[in-house]
């Protein structure tokens, strides 16, 4: 995927309300190639640096929010180039969401898997449609990662069970845990996310930006370093050859 193609997959609209709406659209399932992850990182970062932006809504078109990394791109690329690119791209996009200078509201419909968990786990507010499900099928793909972010969504032992079994959690479950702000019908998802963003956008922007920096500063753990640690095990699995075998079986 070229830089131009990536720009088409991820697009940003800045509304007069001060809300930047960043939309991912990569049919059929919003599984992202390397360039797509970097496009998210670039556009989220740019939105936060824009003094006219007071909040960001990150959402996706289609039947699911995100299906993780594009496995097909990895399979058709010789060596570890695509693996290294995907790992770096995921790291940069998750980091961009977490470090965005203004609050990021994630709007999730359908499936949110793998890298999608990294994006929403690092966001500030999550709104989900009634059909939304969340999971990390990484062990079924010969990989690890984003348990750091799943830990921000569900309790510790629930997270462990989900990682080991590749089970998913529903939007209702995550709302019960307090990690999902609200659950709405799918047709109301965008409006619900925009309403929260617009409410934040009415606040003094200097205070909101200070609040974002303050809340990150008192976080319980360093999400960037924690995720990077997880990625080390994915590298080991790939070097051992087990990841290629499992991905081939999946493909």
Image: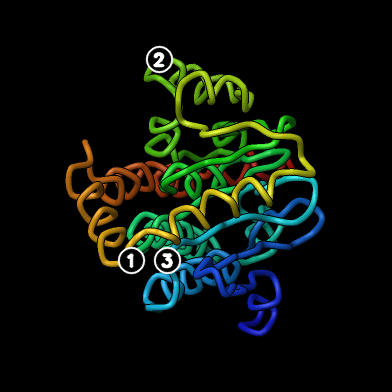
Q: Any mark on residue 205, and which?
A: 1
Query: Mark 2, mark 1: which one is toward the viewer?
Result: 1
Query: For mark 1, does the 10 Å Cα neighbourhood hold few (<14), some (14 to 19), or many (20 or more) residues?
Result: some
Q: Quadrant of the N terminus?
A: bottom right
Report the front residue among 51 and 164. 51
Whole-percent x, y for residue 141 in the image? 61, 39
User: In terms of image quadrants, where is residue 206?
Assistant: bottom left
Report the front residue among 54 and 127. 54
Q: Residue at x 54, y 25 (%)?
A: 175
Relative height, residue 184 to residue 175 (above, below): below
Label 3 and label 1: CA atoms lie apart by: 6 Å
- Whether residue 4 is visible here, answered yes or no, is yes
Query: Mark 2, mark 3: which one is toward the viewer?
Result: 3
Q: Quadrant of the C terminus?
A: top right
Q: Secondary structure at mark 2?
A: helix
- Whether residue 81 is visible here, answered yes or no, is no
Whole-percent x, y for residue 144 in the image? 46, 38
Q: Secondary structure at mark 1?
A: helix
Relative height, residue 209 to residue 124 (above, below): below
Label 2 and label 3: CA atoms lie apart by: 36 Å
Q: What residue is shown with label 3?
A: 54
User: In terms of image quadrants, where is residue 46?
Assistant: bottom left
Callouts 3 and 1 close, C-beta under 8 Å: yes
Query: For mark 2, does the 10 Å Cα neighbourhood hold few (<14), some (14 to 19), or many (20 or more) residues?
Result: few
Label 2 and label 1: CA atoms lie apart by: 38 Å
Q: Secondary structure at mark 3?
A: loop
Q: Which comes sooner in the sequence, label 2 or label 1?
A: 2
Q: Residue at x 64, y 43 (%)?
A: 108
| Label tally | 3
Q: Residue at x 51, y 51 (%)?
A: 105
């Amino acid at each position: 995927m070229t830089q131009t193609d990536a720009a088409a997959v991820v697009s940003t609209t800045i509304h007069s309300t001060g809300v930047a709406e960043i939309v991912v659209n990569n049919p059929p399932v919003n599984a992202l190639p390397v360039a797509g992850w970097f496009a998210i990182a670039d556009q989220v970062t740019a939105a936060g640096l824009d003094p006219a932006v007071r909040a960001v809504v990150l959402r996706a078109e289609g039947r699911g929010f995100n299906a993780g990394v594009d496995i097909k791109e990895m399979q058709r690329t010789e060596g570890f180039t695509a693996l290294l690119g995907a790992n770096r791209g995921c790291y940069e996009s998750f980091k961009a969401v977490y470090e965005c200078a203004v609050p990021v509201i994630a709007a999730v419909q359908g499936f949110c898997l793998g890298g999608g968990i990294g994006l929403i786990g690092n966001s500030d507010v999550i709104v989900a449609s009634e059909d939304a499900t969340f999971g990390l099928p990484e062990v079924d793909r010969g990989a690890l990662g984003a348990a750091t972010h799943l830990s921000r969504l569900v309790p510790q032992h629930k997270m462990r069970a989900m990682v080991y079994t590749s089970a998913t959690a529903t939007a209702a479950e995550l709302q019960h845990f307090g990690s999902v702000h609200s659950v709405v019908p799918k047709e109301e998802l965008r409006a619900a996310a925009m309403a929260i963003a617009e409410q934040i956008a009415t606040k003094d922007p200097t205070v909101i930006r200070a609040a974002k920096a303050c809340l990150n500063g008192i976080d319980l753990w360093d999400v960037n370093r924690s995720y990077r640690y997880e990625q080390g095990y994915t590298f080991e699995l790939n070097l051992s050859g087990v990841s290629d075998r499992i991905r081939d079986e999946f493909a």
